[in-house]
């Protein structure tokens, strides 16, 4: 069978082509394999790149969240800082204004620093009263023409005043658009707070703080701070006004007291003049009376001796009465004269240091008959270490005699009279007591017992005559010795006369004499 | 041979009286007729010429520089009102001072160069331990002033300083120089003869969100980031609930979230505060911006701030090699203070905890800081920093 034969080319390239084809196929396969692989890598790479881009974008989104949160935190921190600074400023200001009661000074303290530390550039304080309306007290940075306009306009706005009275705070944060626009137009501050200054009498003024257009808006915290400042300011102003009132009242009172003191001084001078005239009168009259009385007493005595002829017994008896009454009258006149002299300082006390015991013993001897008559005991109790006391013997004798005689007079039979002495070494004085177990003295009478001519209204005084000068004289004498005398008594139980005598008179101020004194 | 340091402070509401009070405190502590040098920090209300004259009449300082600041740091407190004076008398230290004003009329680098030249001339000796400089912070590219100073002074001289500002409004700066108060100025004090000098600086900011690339920058202005106007970086994060950045309190935002620029040379990000935003959306920074660098929005917190203070104090102690400095100058960014919630005490107490309670501490809050990044070993890289803490110890 004839086969198909192909003519053989002298240069048969078929095997070569075949080989080339195979090679190409192999290379293509390898390349295809390689490119397929690379394409996969590229896809992976692209996918990874996309992932990275996405991650970056996610990172950016997260960053946005972070900055948002951070901004909020910063804002909160700033607000907190502002509050802290504000509170610290308020605390400082509060301390400062609470220390002053001068209204002008209070307004001077509300200065630029305070406004700045509270976060505001403009500040206005107006005081208010119904008569004058609003008055400018402090202005930082607001146009005076604008303030004048605001002052007039707001002062006439009853609705606004009523809102202030109710404590309403106006601000760019919470006021209505209409109110906000009006206040911005009046005071040219876009961000503002206007708070009333409320006192017990009502609206005392207003406090306005504000910032211009580029500043941050006010916050609720700002409102709170400004309302605290306003109330502190109002309180300080109220205190200063109360102080002013109290000061005026005290000035008026002082002037009234001065006026009355002057009147009283004049009255006292009148009394002193009258007292002096009285003493002079008593002195003059006493002198004039004593001279004829001496004559009367002398003549009566001569008549009684019978040298000018016998006289009947009845006449003798009457002459005796004339004599006795003359003696009483002379004693009265002498007492009056003594009181007058001591009061006017015309009697000089001849004081020397004495041991008081002998004088008291003599007085006891002298009064023994009267004591015996009424069976009254007299006891003298003196401290063992009784120091010498400086006194005028004649005058001090009269004091003790007067006091003991009085005690005998008002002590019933069988009673007891005691003379006691105590020492006050601190004050360097002796305290004497003449105590009795007599009828005692009423409270009302105790007040006047040392007055001249005052006699207690009782049965004994009705029976036994007296001048009412004895205790007055004793008082004058004790006071002339830089001492004091007083009395205590219980009705039905007895009376005690107390008086003090300093050991010595040196270094004593003469003005201390006659000083009213009570234990 | 001795050197004595005294610090006086007053916040008397009358500025002249405050200067008088503070100066008398210094005089009483130093007990000298005149002092060799004074460093004065004052807050806005105390930039007072009459007050400065009072200081001169009391202390008669040979050299005096100072700066406006929003706050003064003292050994036991920080004050946001008042005037503080650090007085030095020494028979071993020597000083030189210089001041130039009208900075806006001179190219920045030249201004820095001139200031340093005057400083060196006044100091008149080659023994220089450290230089302290303060200059206007509102000038657009402050990096170049710093560069100018270093060019003239020498790259190896430790340099630190700050940019003072008003009470955080960032509207103006002012400086004390001898008997004058200068506007738009730069002032410097050079100290020689001391046996130890240590400087440390720390920032404590962490990157936030995805990195972006500064693809358009010129000097201190960032024009575009990721082919968008630079401000879009802030808009992306803060425009969620506002239609304009003004509504988002941009002034606060740009301070609380500065820019962190990644550089190949340093491990830490270079922090830059945006100080202005231009109409085309470009961001103006205080210092030079390297184009092509990655940029992040940065964030910090109280803990990080406190940790950085502690780290800085430890580094300073390490540099001091057991020696006790005569005083520590603290320059702390007011932005850090803001980030710490306005609490001043941690800075002071952390320094005292590490360095001891008896070392005089005097400092101020700044808008920008001049120091080597990190430690003194990086003195060659001294530059304008932002949002950082700088401590200088001299003894």
Image: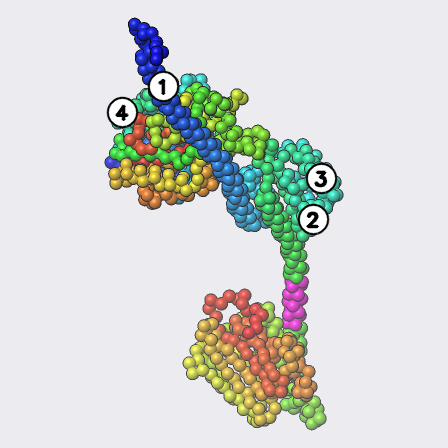
| Marks 1/2 same chain | yes
- The chain ID associated with circle 3 is A
Mark identifier at residue A154: 3
Span highlighted in magenta in the image:
A266-283
Q: Residue at x 68, y 44 (%)?
A: A128
Q: Are marks 3 and 2 in contact (CB under 8 Å)?
A: no
| Marks 4/1 same chain | no
Whole-angstrom CA distance, mark 4 to mark 1, is 86 Å
Q: Residue at x 42, y 20 (%)?
A: B219
Per the picture, the main secondary structure of the magenta-coloured stretch is helix
Image depth: mark 1 or mark 2 in front: 1
Image depth: mark 2 or mark 4 in front: 2
Q: Position of residue B37 (x, y in %)?
A: 34, 32
Task: Looking at the picture, tell me which residue is in the foreground, A308 or A497.
Answer: A497
Q: Earlier in the sequence, mark 3 or mark 2?
A: 3
Task: Looking at the picture, tell me which residue is in the foreground, B229 or B342.
Answer: B229
Whole-angstrom CA distance, mark 4 to mark 3, is 72 Å
- The chain ID associated with circle 4 is B
Residue B322 horizontal side relative to residue A61, left or right: left
State the residue lying farthest toward the front. Answer: A1
| Marks 1/3 same chain | yes
Mark identifier at residue A25: 1
Mark 4 closeness class: few <14, some 14–19, many ≥20 residues within 10 Å: few
Q: Quadrant of residue B185?
A: top left
């Amino acid at each position: 069978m004839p086969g198909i034969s192909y003519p053989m080319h002298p240069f048969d390239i078929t095997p070569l082509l075949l080989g080339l084809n195979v090679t190409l196929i192999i290379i293509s396969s390898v390349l295809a394999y390689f490119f397929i692989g690379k394409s996969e890598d590229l896809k992976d790479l692209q996918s990874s790149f996309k992932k990275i881009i996405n991650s970056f974008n996610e990172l950016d989104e997260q960053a946005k969240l972070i900055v948002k949160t951070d901004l909020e935190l910063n804002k909160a921190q700033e607000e907190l800082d502002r509050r802290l600074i504000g509170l610290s400023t308020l605390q400082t200001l509060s301390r400062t204004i609470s220390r002053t009661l001068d209204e002008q000074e209070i307004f001077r303290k509300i200065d630029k620093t305070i406004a700045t530390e509270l976060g505001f550039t403009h500040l206005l304080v107006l005081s208010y009263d119904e008569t004058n309306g609003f008055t400018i007290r402090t202005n930082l940075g607001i146009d005076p023409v604008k303030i004048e306009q605001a002052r007039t306009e707001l002062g006439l706005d009853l609705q606004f005043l009523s809102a202030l009275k109710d404590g309403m705070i106006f601000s760019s944060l919470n006021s209505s658009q209409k109110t906000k626009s009006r206040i911005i137009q009046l005071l040219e501050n876009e961000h503002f707070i206007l708070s009333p200054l409320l006192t017990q009498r009502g609206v005392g003024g207003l406090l306005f703080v504000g910032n211009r257009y580029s500043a941050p808006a006010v916050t609720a915290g700002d409102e709170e701070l400004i309302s605290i400042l306003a109330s502190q300011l109002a309180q300080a102003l109220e205190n200063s006004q109360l102080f002013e009132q109290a000061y005026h009242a005290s000035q008026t009172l002082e002037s009234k007291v001065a006026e009355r003191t002057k009147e009283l001084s004049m009255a006292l001078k009148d009394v002193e003049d009258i007292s002096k005239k009285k003493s002079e009168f008593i002195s003059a009259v006493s002198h004039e009376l004593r001279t004829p009385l001496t004559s009367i007493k002398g003549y009566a005595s001569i008549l009684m001796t019978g040298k000018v002829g016998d006289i009947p017994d009845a006449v003798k008896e009457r002459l005796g009465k004339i004599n006795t009454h003359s003696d009483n009258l002379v004693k009265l006149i002498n007492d009056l004269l003594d009181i007058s002299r001591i009061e006017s300082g015309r009697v000089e006390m001849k004081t020397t240091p004495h041991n008081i015991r002998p004088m008291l013993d003599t007085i006891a001897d002298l009064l023994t008959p009267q004591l015996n008559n009424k069976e009254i005991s007299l006891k003298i109790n003196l401290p063992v270490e009784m120091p010498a006391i400086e006194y005028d013997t004649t005058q001090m004798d009269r004091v003790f005699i007067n006091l003991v005689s009085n005690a005998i007079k008002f002590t019933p039979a069988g009673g007891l009279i005691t003379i006691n002495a105590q020492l006050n070494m601190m004050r360097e004085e002796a305290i004497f007591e003449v105590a009795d177990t007599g009828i005692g003295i009423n409270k009302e009478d105790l007040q006047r017992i040392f007055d001249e001519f005052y006699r207690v209204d009782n049965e004994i005084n009705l029976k036994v005559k007296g001048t009412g000068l004895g205790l007055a004289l004793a008082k004058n004498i004790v006071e002339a010795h830089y001492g004091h005398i007083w009395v205590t008594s219980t009705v039905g139980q007895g009376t005690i006369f107390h008086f003090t005598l300093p050991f010595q008179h040196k270094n004593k101020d003469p003005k201390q004499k006659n000083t009213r004194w009570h234990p | 041979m001795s050197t004595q340091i005294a610090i006086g402070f007053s916040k008397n509401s009358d500025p002249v009286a405050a200067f008088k009070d503070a100066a008398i405190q210094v005089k009483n502590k130093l007990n000298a007729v005149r002092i060799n040098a004074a460093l004065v920090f004052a807050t806005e209300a105390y930039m007072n010429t009459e007050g400065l004259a009072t200081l001169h009449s009391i202390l008669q300082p040979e050299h005096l520089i100072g700066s406006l600041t929003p706050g003064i740091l003292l050994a036991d407190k920080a004050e946001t009102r008042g005037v503080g004076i650090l007085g030095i008398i020494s028979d071993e230290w020597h000083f030189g001072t210089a001041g130039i004003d009208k900075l806006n009329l001179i190219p920045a680098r030249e201004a820095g160069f001139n200031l340093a030249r005057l400083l060196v001339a006044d100091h008149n000796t080659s023994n220089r331990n450290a230089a302290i400089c303060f200059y206007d912070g509102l000038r657009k590219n402050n990096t170049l002033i710093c560069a100018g100073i270093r060019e003239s002074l020498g790259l190896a001289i430790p340099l630190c300083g700050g940019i003072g500002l008003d009470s955080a409004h960032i509207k103006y700066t002012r400086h004390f120089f001898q008997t004058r108060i200068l506007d738009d100025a730069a002032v410097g004090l050079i100290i020689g003869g001391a046996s130890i000098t240590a400087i440390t600086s720390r920032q404590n900011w962490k990157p936030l969100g995805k990195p972006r690339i500064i693809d358009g920058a010129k000097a201190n202005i960032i024009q575009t980031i990721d082919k968008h106007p630079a401000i879009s970086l802030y808009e992306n994060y803060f425009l969620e609930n506002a239609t304009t950045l003004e509504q988002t309190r941009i002034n606060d935002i740009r301070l609380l979230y500065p820019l962190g620029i990644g550089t190949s040379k340093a491990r830490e990000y270079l922090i830059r505060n945006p100080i202005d935003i231009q109409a085309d959306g470009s961001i103006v920074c205080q210092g030079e911006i390297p184009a092509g660098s990655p940029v992040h929005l940065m964030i910090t917190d109280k803990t990080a701030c406190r940790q950085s203070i502690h780290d800085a104090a430890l580094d300073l102690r390490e540099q001091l090699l057991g020696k006790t400095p005569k005083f520590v100058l603290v320059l702390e960014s007011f932005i850090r203070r803001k980030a710490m919630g306005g609490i001043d005490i941690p800075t002071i107490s952390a320094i005292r905890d590490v360095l001891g309670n008896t070392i005089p501490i005097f400092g101020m809050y700044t808008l920008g800081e001049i120091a080597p990044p990190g430690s003194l070993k990086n003195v060659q890289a001294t530059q304008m920093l932002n949002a950082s803490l700088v401590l200088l110890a001299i003894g």
